[in-house]
Image: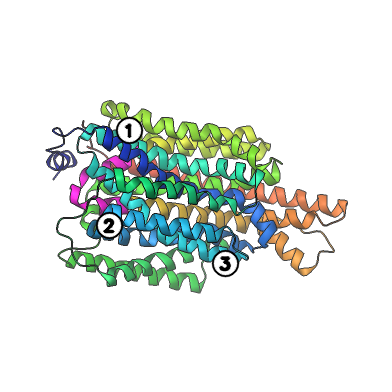
């Protein structure tokens, strides 16, 4: 069945029911957890210098603080999307909101790096309950095709805008409070949501759900954890025997997972959806666009504060234009896609993101925060456009009663992109930094380890050294960090160019409707 015919079949009744004030109010309420989870995915990047000073994490621990949240979230999204279809999307959303707020309050007072990593993992668990439910509820709340596209555009703008808002919120909080405040913001936001959601958000679920498949849940975890850990290891240390073994283990679990889904009458994840080029292409576009965004945020937050010398608030404001562009782009493509089609918007957006990494190279070489602002604007423009339309394509292909599963696939791509963006680009940056930084004579063992692993560690060590040694270490560390940015930017730009070509091919023949 062609993409156009499939949409026509699934949306045959979409022209009869228009959403009213209650439905649009429900959308506004659903944006609360969307914004929060998106902000939470990136806000920690801006707190890394403060956390480095307070908890003295190693370079590996620093990466895990970022990665573990998205890793757990991505590993459980498909399971939770299937669970939402069965027990009720609003019900799971409320459970997740309560848990997320509670664990956020605990994370704010984590006494060690290990404790913070553990609480971030718990946040990933409850975050996985939030995201599929919000997008799949929109599929059922907005029956009219054109209204649903606008609702998805607002959802995507909130999601990508929230990711960009993270550094700005983090900058403000870190300017006035301690690093734990970036977690406490979840409590009032989700408290308000828990009050409003039962009143305005309708419940929905699959009318004929299958049983909960514990084996498939276990296999999905067995795919994600070893593969991502192996990628992190390869990015830092190259292809070792351990990394190769983990890759084989993850791929074997993936083969078993796919085989099990194909054999079950009611699979947890309908992998047959990936036979449709438009679906697969849109999912991959989601993954790679977020890959580029999160990889950028990992290093730009440290560069602006530790190299350019900006305060957390100044660094957040530097990224404000990109935040605005993200939201504007997501909304602007809604009328535009009717004339150009999804293929042009998604592939074009990925090309613009590639151009953004070209501007990163310019900014890192010239030491120019203004060039990095331009880079973020270009990245945000491309991602805001591509994410909106790719999510619309994904949801339009599936029937309404499977919206939770399709939403989970879309969100899994998003979170896996976030994990890989930090693991691959962050890992390469960390490895390049460690290889190029030159340590001055006279450092003790602990100081040498700290300074050689992260730029934040080098900055902290330099503050305790005599002026000549301090200046020598800072200069070397900043140059090594800039060298790492250059290498990762070239890789990211190449990935985005490849993604644009992939989207152009996969979305051939896909047309916009409504």
Say if 374 sits above or below 393 in the image. above
Q: Residue 471: image x %, image y %?
A: 82, 49
- Residue under the image location 31 percent in, 68 percent down: 217
Q: CA distance from mark 2 to mark 3?
A: 29 Å
Between disc 1 and disc 3, the foreground one is: 3
Tag 2: Cα neighbours inside 10 Å, few (<14), some, or many (≥20)?
many
Q: Residue 23: image x %, image y %?
A: 27, 37
- Residue under the image location 13 percent in, 33 percent down: 16
Residue 505 falls in image quadrant: top left
Q: Quadrant of the C terminus?
A: top left
- Residue under the image location 57 percent in, 39 percent down: 360
Side (left or right) of 152 relative to 424: left
Side (left or right) of 42 relative to 406: right
Q: Residue 412: image x %, image y %?
A: 36, 54
Residue at the spot of label 1: 344
Q: Nearer the viewer, residue 160 or 298?
A: 160
Between disc 1 and disc 2, the foreground one is: 2
Q: Is residue 350 visible?
A: no
Helix, strand or loop at label 3? It is helix
- Residue under the image location 22 percent in, 53 percent down: 273
Q: Which mark is drawn over residue 84?
A: 2
Residue at the spot of label 3: 115
First in residue order: circle 2 vs circle 3: 2
Q: Quadrant of the N terminus?
A: top left
Q: CA distance from mark 1 to mark 3?
A: 45 Å
Q: Residue 122: image x %, image y %?
A: 46, 63
Magenta residues?
387-408
First in residue order: circle 1 vs circle 3: 3
């Amino acid at each position: 069945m062609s993409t156009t015919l499939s949409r026509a079949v699934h949306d045959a009744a979409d022209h009869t029911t228009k959403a009213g004030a209650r439905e649009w109010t429900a959308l506004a309420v659903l944006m609360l957890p969307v914004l929060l989870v998106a902000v939470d995915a990136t806000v920690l990047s801006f707190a890394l210098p403060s956390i480095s000073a307070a908890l003295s994490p190693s370079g590996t621990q620093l990466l895990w603080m970022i990665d573990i949240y998205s890793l757990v979230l991505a590993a459980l999204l498909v399971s939770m999307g299937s669970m939402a279809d069965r027990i009720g999307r609003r019900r799971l959303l409320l459970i997740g909101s309560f848990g997320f707020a509670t664990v956020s309050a605990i994370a704010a007072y984590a006494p060690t790096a290990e404790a913070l990593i553990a609480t971030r993992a718990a946040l990933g668990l409850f975050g996985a309950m939030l995201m599929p439910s919000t997008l799949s509820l929109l599929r059922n709340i907005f029956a009219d095709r054109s209204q649903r596209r606008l609702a998805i555009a607002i959802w995507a703008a909130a999601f990508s805008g929230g990711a960009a808002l993270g550094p700005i919120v983090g900058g403000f909080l870190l300017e006035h409070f301690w690093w734990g405040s970036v977690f406490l913001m979840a409590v009032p936001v989700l408290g308000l949501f828990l009050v409003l959601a039962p009143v305005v958000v309708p419940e929905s679920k699959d009318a004929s759900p299958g049983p909960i498949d514990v084996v498939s849940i276990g296999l999905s975890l067995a795919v994600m954890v070893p593969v991502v850990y192996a990628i992190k290891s390869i990015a830092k240390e190259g292809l070792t025997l351990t990394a190769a073994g983990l890759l084989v283990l993850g791929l074997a679990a993936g083969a078993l997972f796919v085989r099990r889904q194909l054999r079950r009458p009611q699979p947890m994840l309908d992998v047959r959806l990936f036979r449709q080029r438009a679906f697969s292409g849109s999912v991959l576009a989601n993954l790679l666009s977020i890959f580029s965004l999160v990889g950028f945020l990992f290093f730009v937050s440290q560069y602006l504060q530790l190299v350019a010398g900006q305060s957390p608030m100044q660094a957040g404001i530097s990224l404000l234009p990109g935040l605005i562009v993200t939201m504007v782009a997501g909304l602007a493509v809604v009328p535009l896609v009717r004339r150009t089609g999804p293929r042009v918007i998604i592939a074009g957006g990925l090309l613009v993101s590639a151009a953004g990494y070209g501007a990163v190279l310019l900014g890192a070489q010239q030491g120019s925060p203004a060039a990095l602002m331009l880079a973020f604007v270009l990245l945000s423009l491309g991602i805001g456009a591509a994410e909106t339309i790719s999510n619309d394509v994904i949801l339009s292909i599936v029937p309404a009663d499977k919206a939770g599963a399709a939403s989970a696939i879309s969100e899994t791509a998003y979170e896996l992109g976030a994990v890989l963006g930090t693991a691959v680009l962050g890992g390469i940056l960390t490895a390049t930094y460690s290889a190029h930084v030159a340590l001055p004579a006279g450092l003790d063992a602990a100081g040498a380890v700290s300074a050689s692993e992260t730029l934040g560690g080098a900055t902290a060590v330099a503050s305790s050294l005599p002026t000549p040694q301090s200046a020598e270490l800072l200069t070397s560390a900043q140059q090594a960090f800039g060298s790492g940015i250059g290498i990762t930017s070239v890789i990211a730009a190449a990935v985005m160019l490849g993604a644009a070509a992939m989207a152009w091919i996969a979305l051939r023949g896909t047309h916009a409707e409504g």
